[in-house]
Image: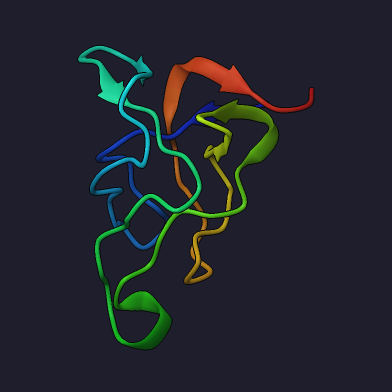
């Protein structure tokens, strides 16, 4: 089970999620939008790292029919999502 990711949470290259493709579900204090597959991630290089998005979210937990992102999901550039919001845990035990 892993922590959900939200806007401003980083991947292992310290690239933050810049916005979410959903606008109704928040987590944490202060509350921030939970990220779903396809949410933009800050550019942190060239090629696949220039404009990555979140990817590989948990298909058993969805918002607006999009998988929710959590720690260790690989972004489209290949970097893994790093520590997220520990008050909301998803995925298999």
Closer to the camera in the image, 59 or 29? 59
Q: Is residue 2 left or right of residue 24?
A: right
Residue shown at 32%/55% (left/top)?
A: 40
Q: Foreground: 17 or 66?
A: 66
Whether residue 56 is situated above or below residue 62 in the rendered picture: below
Looking at this rendering, what residue extends furthest in the front direction?
Answer: 64
Q: Is residue 10 left or right of residue 18?
A: right
| Total numbered labels | 0
The percent position of residue 48, horizontal first and vertical second, equals 42, 80
Asked which quadrant contains residue 1, the reply is: top right
| Residue at position x 44%, y 37% in the image | 83
Q: Residue 47 falls in which quadrant of the image?
A: bottom left
For the point 36% across and 76% down, which residue is it? 49
Q: Position of residue 11 (x, y in %)?
A: 40, 53
Residue located farthest toward the bottom when viewing the structure as drawn: 47
Give residue 56's position: percent from left, percent from top: 62, 52
Residue 20 to residue 15: above or below: above
Q: Which of 86/74 is in front?
A: 74
Residue 71: percent from the left, percent from the top? 53, 40
């Amino acid at each position: 089970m892993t922590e959900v990711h939200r806007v401003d949470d980083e991947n292992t290259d310290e690239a933050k999620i810049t916005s979410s493709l959903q606008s109704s579900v928040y987590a944490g204090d202060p509350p921030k939008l939970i990220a779903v597959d396809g949410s933009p991630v800050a550019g942190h290089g060239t090629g696949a790292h220039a404009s990555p998005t979140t990817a590989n979210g948990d298909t058993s937990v969805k918002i607006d029919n999009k998988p929710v992102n959590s720690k260790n999901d690989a972004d489209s550039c290949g970097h893994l999502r790093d520590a997220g919001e520990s008050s909301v845990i998803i995925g298999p035990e």
